Structures are given as C-alpha cells and as structure tokens.
Image (cartoon, rainbow, N blue to C red):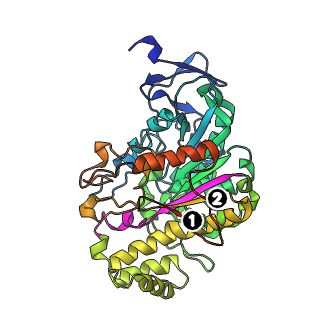
Amino acid sequence: MPAQAYPVAHTPAGAVRGVRDGSGERYRALPYAAAPTGAGRFAPPAPHPGWSGLRDGTRPGPTAPQPARDFGRLDMTPYFGPGWVPGEEYLTVDVHTPAADNGARPVMVFVHGGGFVTGSSRAALYDGSAFARDGVVLVSVDYRLGIPGFLALAGAPDNRGLLDVLAALTWVRESVAAFGGDPGNVTLFGQSAGATLVGALLATPGAGGLFRRAIIQSGNGTGAFTPEQGERVTAAAAAALGVEPTVRAFAPVPDEQFLAILPALAGLDLRTGTATDPLAGLSPFGLVLPVQPADALAEGPAADVDLLIGATTEEGNLYVVPGGGLESTTDADLLDLAARVHADPRGALAAHRSARPDATPGELRSAVLGQALFTAGTTRLTQAHARISGGRTHCYSFGYRSTALGGRLGAAHTVDLPFVFDTADEPWLHGDTGLLGPDPAPDGLAAHVHGAWVAFARTGNPGWSPYDPRRPTARILGG
C-alpha cells in the first residue's frame, strides 16, 4: 500500500495514523477517556493523558465487557458486532472522514444500541463509508455497559455510560477539527439504547453547547428506571456476587464475574408502587433517573437543539418473531407482559384488541412490546420537544417490512439501520435469516433515508415539514 494511504491527523492528545480507502480516511480506537479499571470502572470518565510519538489508529480496538446475545434464527451479528474483545482501553471512538484537513464539515456522532449490555462501534451495520462519501465526519462511540455502565451503586455516580457519551462529545468539541469536522455543527444520533441516551442528554444540563442537532431512532423518552427500581437491581447483583452493594466491594470483582451473574438478574420483577418496568423485563440495566427525560427537557439543551425522531412500525417483532413467539404466545403470556408494563393491564389489552381485532396473541405481544419499549416514549418526547423548541422537531415512521424469517420479521426494531447507513444492498444482510431477508432492498429507499439524515445534519431540515402538535403526523419512510 502506498505511503499516502496512511494519513496522519494531529489531535490535541497526539498524532494518530489512519488508513485511506475509496470512501475517505478511518481512524480507529481513539481514546476519549482513560481506561476504566478496578474501582475506576465505577468512577466518572477521567481525562486521557495523551501519548507521544505516532499512535496507530488503523486497527479496531477492544470493546466493553458484554455477554453474547442470541436472537434465534435471525442473524444479528451485523448489529452486535464481535461481542467482547478484551482490553482495558475501550472508552474510544472511531472516526470516518472524507479527509483530515480543515474542511469544517458536518459531524455526526453515533451511539450504538444493544439493551445497555451489548454492542460496539465495530458492528458492521455502523460502517461510515456512506457518510464520509457524502461529506460528513462520522464519529462512533463506545461506552461502558452492564454493571460498570449502569448499575446504581453507593459511592459511584449513576449512569456512567451516559457520562461516557458526554465525555466523548467533549472530545469531539476539542478534537474533531483535526479530522476535517466542524465542532460547531455536531449532530448526536443513536438507535435503541443509544437513542435513549441521546434523549437523556437532551435533558442533561452539562450537555449544553456540545451538539446542535439530535436524531433519536427507536429510543424511549420514558425508559428510565426510578431510583427504587435501580436499588432493586443493585441488591440482586450484590446478592448474586455475595458482596456488599458498594464500590469498595465491587472494585476487585473481575468483569468475567459481572457477566457470569447476568442470568441471575434476568426477569427481575421491577414493578413498584409508583412505576411499571420501562424495559419490559428485557434488561435489568438502563438509565436510573428521578424524572423521565421526556419530562425534564427544560433542564438541558433541548430547546436549542433541532430534533429528528421516530420509530419503526413493528418494533416489537424483533423480540417475538425470531424465537417463535408469534406462534407460541398464549393469552396468559400476553396478560403477564401487560401487567409488567401497564398499571391497568386489562384495559391496555382491550385497547390493543380494539385497534387490531383480528390479531393473534403473538401479534398483540409484539404490539404491547413495541409501544412500551419505544413508541409511547417516543411520542411523549416528540410532543415535549415540540412544545419548547419552536418548530424544530421533525418526526418520522419507518415502515419497510423485512422479508426475513418467512416474511414475518416485518418493520421490526433495527430494520431501519441499513437504510440510515446506506448498507441495505450488502449481501450479509440478506437471505432468510439476514436482517433484511431474501428480497432485495427497495430501489432508492436507502438513498432517500440516508440522504434525509445527511440533510438534517447539514441544515436541521430532513426534507419535510416540522411536527405540528395540533395536527400530529409523521413522515412515512418505506411504508
């Protein structure tokens, strides 16, 4: 490979060597904070000391400790990536840019999903080639997950994974100009758990001035656990480890042991006298907040941030179809689920049945999950932002139905991502067990969706009218 294929960017922390290809330049595993080890796993992110000489940014780095995830017959490897790749220095970003020059290009900072316990910027779905091709600097963030990232623990700040993303945004402000980006034009975007973190940052006072726009894809503005629920998870984790629920007791426990106890935390009953389970039993980890982000936007920079927000039309299918739940769900299963996520489960089920009188229990299970995990909280956050931002809210609904798993996967959670990243034609997304199924992606849909995201990052306008609370509608994408 010729010498010019290895460009060098000069950041405040030191010089880093990347690699150039047909889509631009990539710089990988750049630390935005010091490695979290020992008790430091439960501390706020600390500044990275930088380095001397030339850092190698040509290879991917380690990932946050995480368990394997299984979605039955559906191949979710492109979404979850390689899993846990051990190594201490995983509080890093990857940068994909047209060129590390003085181009002052729009910057998009992506926060991955994975239920607050899995995922990384190394996932194939998050390839930034199309963004770089279209003149955008894409920064992908890795953050602490599971117990180190989100367990509420005496002596530690809550929501350390969220603090990591905040630290990464500070790194972007200080360093992205070295990669040809404009620190004054940053769009923060995420999907699933990553989108929920983006929503929380809209309500975080310390996030002011760090991003100008935000995109929330299938997040939940009402998905945080209450402190009481967080304490219940902490008590269960401490009991499973046989230690006290303090930083001092957790500090010497190896990451492998944190992962080993996760099955013991599955299925915890987190309902309290004042709250249902916002994650429907799918994860014991998430944000722990006294007030939901959708109700606290005035505390953060939300009023000054342009917002693009939406969800897929069949979100819950991801959690029902691959494991056979469409066929196996009973009325009793459905009522158990509704009781976990609704204060009036029978009333909620009656409303779902009224809207879809011919739906099977499995189809209703998908609808209950989709509403509880994503669409209800998305709607509430959309309405709250529209009230305070003066016409700066844009809403969408993604309706393209994947033909995976015999055509049953549909417009499930994550199906929008290949269209946002313009990778929908990649063969590894197709076949009956691939995320998009055996059929080819519709002509022009990826170009349209990806183009809307890029346009929004440039101007704050994705190509359609702002959300109007008086006539609430969403732009349908692929429906």
Where is residue 9? Give x, y as percent.
Answer: 58, 21
Question: Of the residues shown, which amino acid type is indicated by label 2?
Answer: Thr
Where is residue 29? Give x, y as percent.
Answer: 51, 32
Residue that appears at 46% across and 69% down: 370
Residue 25 visible? The answer is: yes
Q: Is residue 449 above or below residue 386?
A: above
Residue that appears at 49% across and 71% down: 371
Drawn side of residue 262 relative to residue 430, left or right:
right
Q: Earlier in the sequence, mark 2 or mark 1?
A: 1
Where is residue 252? Give x, y as percent.
Answer: 55, 45
Locate the N terminus and report the quarter of the image it occupies.
top left
Quadrant assignment, res 230: bottom right
Q: What is the C-alpha distance between the residues marked 2 and 1?
A: 12 Å
Mark whose residue sits in front, 2 or 1: 2
Instruction: Out of 155 and 386, give the one closest to the viewer.
Output: 386
Q: Which residue is mark 1?
A: 378
Question: Of the residues shown, which amino acid type is indicated by label 1?
Answer: Thr
Residue furthest to the top in view is 3
Element class at badge 1: helix
Q: Which residue is mark 2?
A: 393
Q: Residues within 10 Å of mark 1 (few under 14, many from 20)?
A: many
Q: Is residue 54 above or below residue 355?
A: above
